[in-house]
Image (spheres, grey):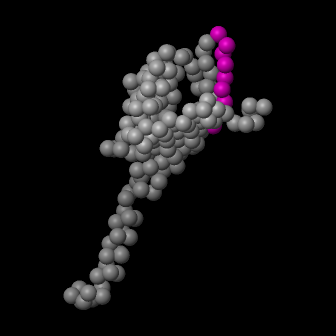
Amino acid sequence: MNFNNISYWPSLLTLFITLSACSNNVDVVEEVRQIRKLWDKTSDYVCNGDWENYSLSWAHTAQIQLMHPDQGDWITGWEKLKAKYEVLLKSRMKCTWPKNDLTINVSTSGDMAWGTADCIIQFDDSTKTQIHLWETTVFEKIDGQWKMVLGMASVPRTLKE
């Protein structure tokens, strides 16, 4: 192969790009473990009113979104999320998660992931209210740490009726 011949360069460039894309060596099992750990800790932070640690679970950008359609919430941006949830979490609502099943999918690039969860949250107040939630969360790896960038939780329709 004569590398001075310009006709070979597009093929070599394509081969190099293809090999580079295939060699990202994402350890999916480890990424899922890290995300699951973040999810479990974040759930605990919610129930224990730990705003400081809960806030570290989220990316602090203007693009993040949190939606709770049943409550009419569609929050966009870190500052708005902070304004609403800091007060809520610091009110120290006590709760537990009798069910918190999360299924995680990691992108082939290893920097994005999404999860779907079937959860039951029980409030440890006098009513012992339980809420069944279906949740979708998108995670992004930022500076080597997984952060939540999008969350949506809804009460399943069949459970509302």
Residue 34 is at least partly visible in this image: no
Image height of 112 relative to 155, above or below: below
Q: Is residue 74 left or right of residue 38?
A: right
Q: Is residue 96 left or right of residue 58?
A: right
Is residue 150 covered in magenta? Answer: no
Residue drawn at point x = 50 percent, y = 21 percent: 88
Among the 4 quarters of the image, the one containing residue 146? top left
Of residues 69 and 119, which is closer to you in this image?
69
- Quarter holding the N terminus? bottom left
Which residues lie in the magenta part? 126-134
Magenta segment includes 127: yes
Viewer-side residue, 17 vs 23: 17
Q: Nearer the viewer, residue 85 or 46?
A: 85
Q: Along the horizontal axis of the image, is 3 left or right of 65? A: left
* In the depicted structure, whether residue 125 falls above or below residue 63: above
Q: Residue at x 38, y 57 (%)?
A: 25
User: What x and y, as percent, mark residue 157?
Assistant: 73, 37
Image quarter (top left, top right, bottom left or bottom right) of the C terminus: top right
As displayed, is residue 82 above or below residue 49?
Answer: below
Q: Is residue 53 visible?
A: yes
Which x, y percent locates residue 96? 58, 22
Q: Position of residue 47 (x, y in %)?
A: 52, 21
Rendered view: 22 above or below 73: below
Q: Residue furthest left?
A: 4
Query: Residue drawn 48% across and 48% down?
Result: 113
Please provide percent x and percent y for residue 29. 46, 47
